[in-house]
Image (cartoon, rainbow, N blue to C red):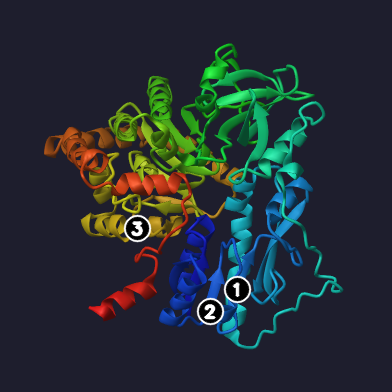
Amino acid sequence: MNILFLTHSFNSLAQRLFIELTRCGHDISIEFDISDAVTEQAVELYRPDLVIAPFLKRAIPETVWRSKPCFVVHPGIVGDRGPAALDWAIMHEHRTWGVTVLQANGEMDAGDIWASATFPMRFASKSSLYRHEMTEAAVKAVLAAVARFTSGSYQPMPLDYTRQEVVGRLHAPMRQLDRAIDWQRDDTHAVLKKIYAADGFPGVLDMLYGSLYYLFDACAETELRGNPGTVIARRNDAICRATVDGAVWIGHLKRKSDTEPTLKLPATVVLQEQLADVPEMPPESLPTRCHDGHTTYRDIWFEQKNQVGYLHFSFYNGAMSSTQCERLRAAYLTASQSDVRVIVLMGGADFWSNGIHLNSIEQAASPADESWHNINAMNDLAQAIITNCRQLTLAALQGNAGAGGVFLSLAADRIYARKSVILNPHYKSMGNLYGSEYWTYLLPKRVGEKKARELTHNRLPIDALEAQQIGLIDDCFELNHADFRKQIEQMVEQLAASPDYVRLLAGKCERRARDEQTKPLAHYRAEELRQMQLNFYGFDPSYHVARYHFVYKIPHAWTPLYLARHRRILKTRSK
């Protein structure tokens, strides 16, 4: 079929559905939800058999849903209606939640139901649940709904609250009043729940040092204590606030302003002047981590098991600032001096890496200078990995990766990923950015010159299965996070103990020496940075404009032609 995606943005869910439906043989074109007139024009141009709305913030115009069947992907169980569905599910601590595919009509979320799927709820942030469990359920439900639609014989179920299957209800929008933290009464669990339910957007509005901020990116702390609500410690990017029974770490803040746009930034950057008297906790003082239910905040940590070292780096939204790149490089170099035979770059559970930190760049005194600093820090990290001849290095992608993060993974000797991981191996959608991280050396070695050009110019996502088929990664596994980590551990331990290890390491070092003789790494870096210098300092402001629009979430004014196939057809006809 011809399927038109109508979506607020090409987010992770829309990307995953695009890949899955394309693999099923459907032709997909995408239109951003800009206005009713633009949507109507898109439908007229493409003449889709079906419209799917993976991610909308407003209703589909009546002229469209009356003329074409429109499937809305709602992040709620059957019968759930209203905005902030996943937020309410977290706040009410539902044990299971779901996704419903319903047909748009004149009443929001009240159309006939074509498919649904449920999933168990983790105690985790909304962003993490959306990216993993909810996305998997949405794929299952959308594929079922499309199959039923193409059969021509399926009758969707009307929304009828007297039916046993209809268990959800209409709920009101969630207000900041509903999210508000009472630091004198709320325990750690309650504080985490409220920040989890608002993570990504809109955050929890709260008072700090006499000013209002939105709170994001939280995890528990069980060792430290203090006066509830007080900032009692800081570590790297995060601040620690005491609760009535412990404390929570808050990694990111966004200052509230009614007069100017503000950015979500690391908490210690936002509050730097107020934190002079707050004690700084060194990373090595507390060895555990919070991201899998443990007890403190850490964004980089190293675990050694026998002859294998696991280097974890869990950066918020996968963005890597200059400082984070420098710290990660230092951690990698330290690991390389240990007695391990294999280093595994684990990334984080939600993201492996998305490259340079655009928000930190935007808030810098000179965004061009900070862009230059950040890309060079990324390059230094990649160079350390590429040139390590003391160990084999593996990249284990638990979560999605984009732009420079994809190419950073190529610095490793082998790359493995969960099958549901989405990769965006390109830079051009960020104002025609050229990119670095030695991609002109690493990418053609993996996929060849022709495929390298396709990947970097098409600007479309691929999943781990396609990445494995074209040689971008070595293998992928259809496993959950825990089982993926177990599989990686088994593979790497076998590799470290293998009789072939010495031969494999020697072969790696010989290939690196031959490559260096053919064309030194420094030449690739210099060529890439000449192009990046034009992006950062040249006359074309496209990168700076695109970055500004991205970090401040400026609504799209049009849909890029690489997504809107129907508009490429129109452009071709006009010629």
Tag 1 near tag 2, CB within 8 Å: yes
Asked whether, in this view, residue 87 is left or right of residue 391, the answer is: right
Percent of width and height locating residue 191: 73, 34
Q: Residue furthest right?
A: 162
| Of the pair 532 and 178, the residue shown nearer to us | 178
Q: Residue furthest left?
A: 518
Q: Residue at x 53, y 79 (%)?
A: 50
Which numbered marker is on residue 459? 3
Sequence-first tag of 3 and 2: 2
- Few, some or many residues within 10 Å of mark 1 (<14, 14–19, 20+): many
Res 457 quadrant in image: bottom left
Percent of width and height locating residue 499: 38, 35
Q: Amino acid at mark 1?
A: Phe
Which quadrant: the C terminus? bottom left
Q: What residue would you read off at disc 2?
A: 50
Q: Amino acid at mark 3?
A: Arg
Q: CA distance from mark 3 to mark 2?
A: 24 Å
Tell me: residue 181, above or below residue 145. Answer: above
| Of the pair 47 and 452, the residue shown nearer to us | 47
Which numbered marker is on residue 71? 1
Q: Residue furthest front?
A: 259
Q: Amino acid at mark 2?
A: Leu
| Of the pair 500 and 30, the residue shown nearer to us | 30
